Structures are given as C-alpha cells and as structure tokens.
Image (cartoon, rainbow, N blue to C red):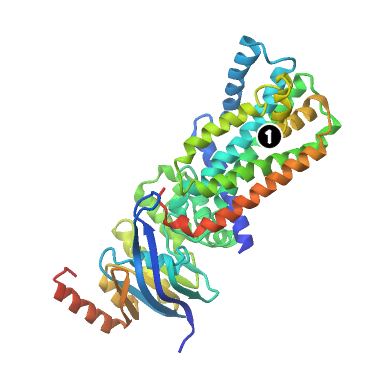
C-alpha cells in the first residue's frame, strides 16, 4: 500500500448561519472520511451544497475540523486559487510575484518563472501595465498563468479547469491536464463528470456533508448514477 | 517557511505602498498634504482663535500630529487588516498576523518619509539638529511597539465584531485629546496634569518633542515602562489572533 499523505476521519465543519451571539450553526461537512495516497488523483463528486468545496479547504489546511480528525504528512497542499491577492493598481508583473508568493512560491522561483508566465498569458506589453487596465478575460489569463506555476506536493483544484476565451480555454485546460498527468497527487472537485472520469483514478462521492462512497472510479460513478436515477435529479 | 513569509511580508508592503501611490492623482503628495491640512485646522483653533497654544505651539503641533498620525494609522489600518483580507484568508493557508504586520510596516515607511520633511521644517524654524537625535530610534521603537500592541489586539477582534470599527474611531479621537497631541500637557492644571502624564502615549509625545525642540534626552524609566506595557499588549494581541485563527476562514467580511 502506498503511503498516505492526508487522512480525514469523521470530519465535521460547522459554520455560523448568522453573525450574532447564540445564532444557529449549520454543518457544511457532517461526517467525511477519506484518505489520499501519494500519486493518487482523487475526484470529488456530489450535488450542489454537498460540501465539496469545504472538503477541499479542509484538505488545504485552511479550515480546521470542528469534530473528527485530520492527519497529514509533512507535505505542502495548495488550493489552485486564481487571482489570489491581485491588486488593481499594480502591474501584471508585480501581481504575478505577489500572487505567486501567496500561493507558496519563493520569490526567486517566481522571478525565474516570470518569462514563462508572460509567454503563457500572451498579454504582451500589457504585462507591465496595471491590471486595472485589463479586461476580465485578460485578468483571468494572467491569474491562470501564475497559478499553473505552483507545484505543491498535493494540488487541489476546484472547478477551474479552463478560463478565458475558447482558444485560451483549450490552452489552459491542456496545461492543467498535463500537470495532473505528471504523477502529482491531485484532488479535483468538478461538476463535469467527464472531466473526473478522464483525469481521476479514484472518486469520493459526498452528499449532505457525508461521505457516501469512496473507491474505484467506475464503481462510484455507477452507484452515483443509480442514486440520481432513483431520486429523479438531473445528472 | 519562515523565509517565505518574510518575502511575502516585504513584497506585500512594497505592493501596498505602490498601490496607494497609484490610487490617487496626487499620489505621494497626499502623504504630506493630509496631515498638513489637519495641522492647519488645529493651529487655527488653538493657536489663533483660542490662543491657548502657548509658545512653540506650531512646532509642537507638527511633531504631535506627525507621530500621532503614524500611531493611529498602525492601529486602524493594521487593526482592520485581518477583517479586510478575510476573502483571501478563506482561500489560502497563511498566518493571519501577516496582514496587520504588512499594514503597520507600510505606515511606518510612510511615517519615515514625512518625518524627514518634518525635520527639514523644524530646522528652518530654528530648531537645529542636536545630539539627543541619537535617542530617536529608541523612542520610535517604543512608539511602534505601542501602536502595534493596540493594532494586534484590534485586528484580532474586528473580524468577529466588525461594528467595533465605529467605536474605535471615537476612542482614538478621545485618546488623541487626552494624550497632549494637539496641546501641551503643561497647560493643564494640577492635579489633572499628573494623571494625564501617566498616559503612555503622552510620555512618547513628550519624549519626541523634548528631543526635537529642546535637545533633551528622553526619560529612560518612562520609556522602558511604556515599552514593557506595549510588548505585553503585542503578546496578548498575537496570542488572541493565534487563538481565533481557526475561526477567521469561516467569517464573512
């Protein structure tokens, strides 16, 4: 058995429903158990509000469990967040450095990768201009170009497989698929079943904050579809 | 990890200063113009209309407001930093103290620019450099510790109770008037004067003015007491932030 990097045991995460003393709490995650092994590509499926994104933030170490346990090996986990720390009045170059630092890269590594970032985002001279002058599509191009440079031990992806116009969508999607195929450990949350089916080898299905089934991709999908069919919900 | 955080703090500070400069048309000029306008208002009221300023009122006011503006910025900007960065805290695993520290460093660098200008003005007004200037770094360290102590405590609780911001603005105005920022405590009658002189911020104001206007070395015992209280406040603030850190990613701005 390959070594386990992160293990969640009956994890629950509660949020305050209202900002007031004694306000009600709701459990975004109720009881989720899952383990992630080195080199594994785990897909997370479930309906809207099932707790998929919350789960990803627990794995990233952003949220501490209110109940249950999280055990992790000394590895870096990074949620692939786009435009992290972007500041409108700074140039594309400065924002790339700032965002890279936020994503856990050392400054010398980001500076070394700036030519690659500049080339990937195809912004030309705009790279030196404040991003306040960018269109939203241009901002996303820059954001993705920076985020794809990050190489944590465990890469966590929440529905950001393709951004920008059709051409850049294909380019960014390819880059990400390439990154996932390099033997990295990945957790992917997506509504796109096709994507999970092609990119992941194991799947976790969660519903109402609870893990329903975890295991081989085809077996979990089969059970998931049977459930969707029985409950009459759209896939 | 530690080196990465230092790089993040330093670059974020640079980014903050650069963005602030770019945000307004006059950019850096506002760093000087804003306190200058404030000084004009107090000089008009206390110096010209009420005539309660006393001798050396203008240089005293210049020094008081420059130092106070620095402290106040550290407390408010640093104090609100975790709250304003909650969207970021929800997305990335970073120690929350990074955010107030960045704001306080940026405000301190702004202060140093303004302070150099203040020195030039004082020299032109007939208060030349003197050997007591060597004590300025120590006094500034004490000022920074005091502001950081208050700022850390505020930064810890504002994310949970954002409404506190309205109270903090008022409290800071009261503290400013009680600390002899816009008037000299020497003009306050006894025994109220002795009580007001116990205020740590009043001690810092008096120490800075003594050095710049009269060439007096600061009272070491007074400065040490203020620093000890401030370090205590810093530690309390850091501890509370560390304690509340797991709650921040669950909060809305």
SS under mark 1: helix
Q: Residue A119: horizontal and vertical position, in percent?
A: 45, 58
Q: Residue B154: horizontal and vertical position, in percent?
A: 55, 44
User: Mark 1 = which residue?
Assistant: B201
Q: Relative to B203, is B88 above or below? A: below
Q: Residue at x 36, y 64 (%)?
A: A53
Residue B13 showing in the rendered view: no
Quarter holding the C terminus of chain A is bottom left
Q: Relative to A138, is A10 above or below? A: below
**What count of labels does the image hold?**
1
Q: Residue at x 34, y 67 (%)?
A: A52
Q: Is residue A74 left or right of residue A223?
A: right
Q: Relative to B139, is A51 above or below? A: below
Q: Residue B42: horizontal and vertical position, in percent?
A: 61, 19
Q: Residue B7: horizontal and vertical position, in percent?
A: 61, 56
Q: Residue B81 versus residue B185: which sits nearer the camera?
A: B185
Q: Residue B186 versus residue B100: which sits nearer the camera?
A: B186
Q: Chain of mark 1?
A: B
Q: Which residue is most to the right?
A: B131
Q: Which residue is most to the front?
A: B191
Q: Relative to A2, is B70 above or below? A: above
Q: Residue B147 versus residue A30: which sits nearer the camera?
A: A30
Residue B83 showing in the rendered view: yes
């Amino acid at each position: 058995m390959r070594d386990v990097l992160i293990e969640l045991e009956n994890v629950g995460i509660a949020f305050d429903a209202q900002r007031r003393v004694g306000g009600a709490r709701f459990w975004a995650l109720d009881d989720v158990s899952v383990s992630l092994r080195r080199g594994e590509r785990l897909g997370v499926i479930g309906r809207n509000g099932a707790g998929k994104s919350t789960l990803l933030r627990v794995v990233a170490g952003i949220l501490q469990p209110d109940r249950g346990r999280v055990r992790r090996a000394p590895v870096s986990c990074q949620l692939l967040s786009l435009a992290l720390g972007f500041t409108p009045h700074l140039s594309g170059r400065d924002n790339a450095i700032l965002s890279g630092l936020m994503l856990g890269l050392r400054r010398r590594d980001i500076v070394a990768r700036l030519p690659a970032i500049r080339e990937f985002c195809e912004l030309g001279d705009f790279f030196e201009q404040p991003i306040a002058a960018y269109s939203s599509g241009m901002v996303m191009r820059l954001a993705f170009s920076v985020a794809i440079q990050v190489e944590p031990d465990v890469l966590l992806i929440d529905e950001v497989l393709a951004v920008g116009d059709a051409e850049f969508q294909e380019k960014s999607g390819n880059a990400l698929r390439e990154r996932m195929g390099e033997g990295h450990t990945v957790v992917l949350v997506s509504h796109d079943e096709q994507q999970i089916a092609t990119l992941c080898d194991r799947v976790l299905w969660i519903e109402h904050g609870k893990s329903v089934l975890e295991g081989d991709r085809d077996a979990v999908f089969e059970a998931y579809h049977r459930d969707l069919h029985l409950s009459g919900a759209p896939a | 990890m530690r080196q990465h955080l230092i790089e993040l703090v330093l670059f974020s500070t640079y980014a903050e200063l650069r963005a602030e400069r770019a945000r307004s048309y006059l950019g850096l000029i506002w760093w000087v113009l804003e306190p200058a306008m404030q000084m004009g208002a107090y000089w008009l009221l206390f110096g010209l209309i009420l005539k309660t300023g006393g001798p050396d009122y203008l240089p005293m006011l210049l020094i008081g407001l420059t130092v106070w503006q620095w402290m106040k910025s550290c407390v408010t900007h640093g104090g609100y930093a975790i709250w304003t960065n909650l969207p970021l805290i929800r997305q990335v695993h970073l120690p929350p103290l990074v955010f107030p520290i960045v704001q306080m460093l940026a405000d301190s660098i702004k202060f140093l620019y303004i302070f150099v200008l203040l020195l030039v003005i004082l020299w032109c007004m007939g208060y030349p450099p003197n050997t007591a200037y060597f004590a300025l770094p120590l006094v500034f360290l004490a000022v920074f510790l005091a502001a950081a102590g208050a700022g850390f405590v505020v930064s810890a609780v504002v994310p949970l109770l954002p409404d506190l911001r309205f109270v903090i603005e008022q409290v800071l105005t009261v503290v400013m008037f009680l600390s002899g920022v816009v008037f000299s405590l020497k003009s306050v009658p006894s025994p109220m004067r002795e009580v007001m002189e116990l205020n740590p911020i009043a001690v810092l104001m008096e120490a800075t003015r003594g050095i710049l206007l009269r060439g007096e070395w600061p009272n070491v015992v007074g400065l040490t007491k203020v620093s000890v209280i401030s370090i205590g406040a810093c530690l309390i603030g850091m501890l509370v932030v560390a304690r509340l850190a797991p709650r921040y990613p669950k909060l809305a701005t």
